């Protein structure tokens, strides 16, 4: 195989504003700092989310959350997000079954096609999206997981340099603590969590804590005092934040290249022509 000379490029595809910050904000900031073109595609504007800050007056939650996401991207050092222009399906009493643009009602191939269009535009070697359980079973997360996975397998027809697909990976120890916060889960936390040997990439992003915390703070309507996190006792809240900020984990969803060693140092590890991207071992990678 000839050495690729395209700019290193990473495309992250998530469902709602704030998904990126919680799951992979430090990792996105790290790669942006390494000269990688980091693109975030967000399927919705989070119109059906909860407004959790009583000090905010928000007339149009979707427009407000769009601006929050733009500010979060600035905090992470990445470009403005690309919106796929679907609607948030909501959860529980907020489910929008009658909204034809809500992700739960949209033809999955339509979502895949939009992601393929973004792949053709930004030419990523690496795709990132939700794990197969969507973190905690949110229908929008599941739709985006499936559509992005499908786009990876079809994507080389749009960009021949597409090489790897990664999923966010949440250890079972963390999903168990989600239950403590009141996170609605249809199944037991062991179902949603992953085992340690499922983790292919462990990113030590402590050096980017400020970037990630600034991105989280940008999503003020979602992380206010009435949010599940905001209602936790201070000690428990601080413990969870420390766990969420310093380390981010990912599994492999697909590859078109040989993986010479497992676990991997980072997303671009072993991709010919991009060896320099993951060489800052002191900032990222597995400890082994």
Image: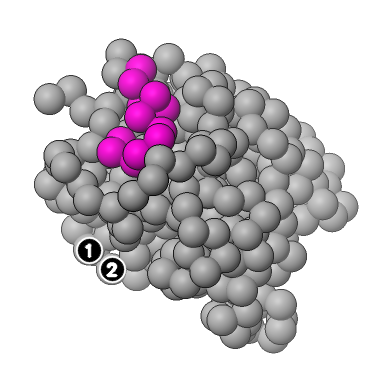
Magenta part mainly helix, strand or loop?
loop
Cα gap from disc 1 to disc 2, whole angstroms: 7 Å
Residues 285 and 249: in front is 285
Provide the residue designation for mark 1.
Answer: 191
In the image as oriented, which residue stretches furthest toward the right?
59
Q: Which residues are magenta?
A: 269-280
- Mark in the foreground, 1 or 2: 1
In this rendering, would 218 be left or right of 14? right
In the image, what residue occupies the spot 67% across and 55% down?
121
Is any atom of residue 132 visible in this view? yes
Does the magenta portion include 34? no
Question: Could you say where residue 97 lies in the image, as x and y percent from the top left?
Answer: 63, 83
Q: Are marks 1 and 2 in contact (CB under 8 Å)?
A: yes
Residues 267 and 111: in front is 267
In the image, what residue occupies the spot 69% across and 63% down?
84
Q: Could you tell me which quadrant the C terminus lies in? A: top left
Does the magenta portion include 275? yes
- Determine crowd level at label 2: few under 14, some 14-19, many 20+ residues with C-alpha closer than 10 A: few
- Determine crowd level at label 1: few under 14, some 14-19, many 20+ residues with C-alpha closer than 10 A: some
In the image as oriented, which residue stretches furthest toward the front?
2
Question: Could you say where residue 227 lies in the image, as x and y percent from the top left?
Answer: 55, 43
In this rendering, would 88 be left or right of 140? right
Question: Could you say where residue 87 lies in the image, as x and y percent from the top left?
Answer: 70, 68
Tell me if residue 106 comes above or below residue 148 in the rendering.
Answer: below
Indicate which disc residue 187 carries: 2
Quadrant assignment, res 280: top left
Residues 90 and 130: in front is 130
Question: Could you say where residue 277 lies in the image, as x and y percent from the top left?
Answer: 42, 27
In the image, what residue occupies the spot 69% across and 29% down?
74
Which structural element holds mark 1? Answer: helix
């Amino acid at each position: 195989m000839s050495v690729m000379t395209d700019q290193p490029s990473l495309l992250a595809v998530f469902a709602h504003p704030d998904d990126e910050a919680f799951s992979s904000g430090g990792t996105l900031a790290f790669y942006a700092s390494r000269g990688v073109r980091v693109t975030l595609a967000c399927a919705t504007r989070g119109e059906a989310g909860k407004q959790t800050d009583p000090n905010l007056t928000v007339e149009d939650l979707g427009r407000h959350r769009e601006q929050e996401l733009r500010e979060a991207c600035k905090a992470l050092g990445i470009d403005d997000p690309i919106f796929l222009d679907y609607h948030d399906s909501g959860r529980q009493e907020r489910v929008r079954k009658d909204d034809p643009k809500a992700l739960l009602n949209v033809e999955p191939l339509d979502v895949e096609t939009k992601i393929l269009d973004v792949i053709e535009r930004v030419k990523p070697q690496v795709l990132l999206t939700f794990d197969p359980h969507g973190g905690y079973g949110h229908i929008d997360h599941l739709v985006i997981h499936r559509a992005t996975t499908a786009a990876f397998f079809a994507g080389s027809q749009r960009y021949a340099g597409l090489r790897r697909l990664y999923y966010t990976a949440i250890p079972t120890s963390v999903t168990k603590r989600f239950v403590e916060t009141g996170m609605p889960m249809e199944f037991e936390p062991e179902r949603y969590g992953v085992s340690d040997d499922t983790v292919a990439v462990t990113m030590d992003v402590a050096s980017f804590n400020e970037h990630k915390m600034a991105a989280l703070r940008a999503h003020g309507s979602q992380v206010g005092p009435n949010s599940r996190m905001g209602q936790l006792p201070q000690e428990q809240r601080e413990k969870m934040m420390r766990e969420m900020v310093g380390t981010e984990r990912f599994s492999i969803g697909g590859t078109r290249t040989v993986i010479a060693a497992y676990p991997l140092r980072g997303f671009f590890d072993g991709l010919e022509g991009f060896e320099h991207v993951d060489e800052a071992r002191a900032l990222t990678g597995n400890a082994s």
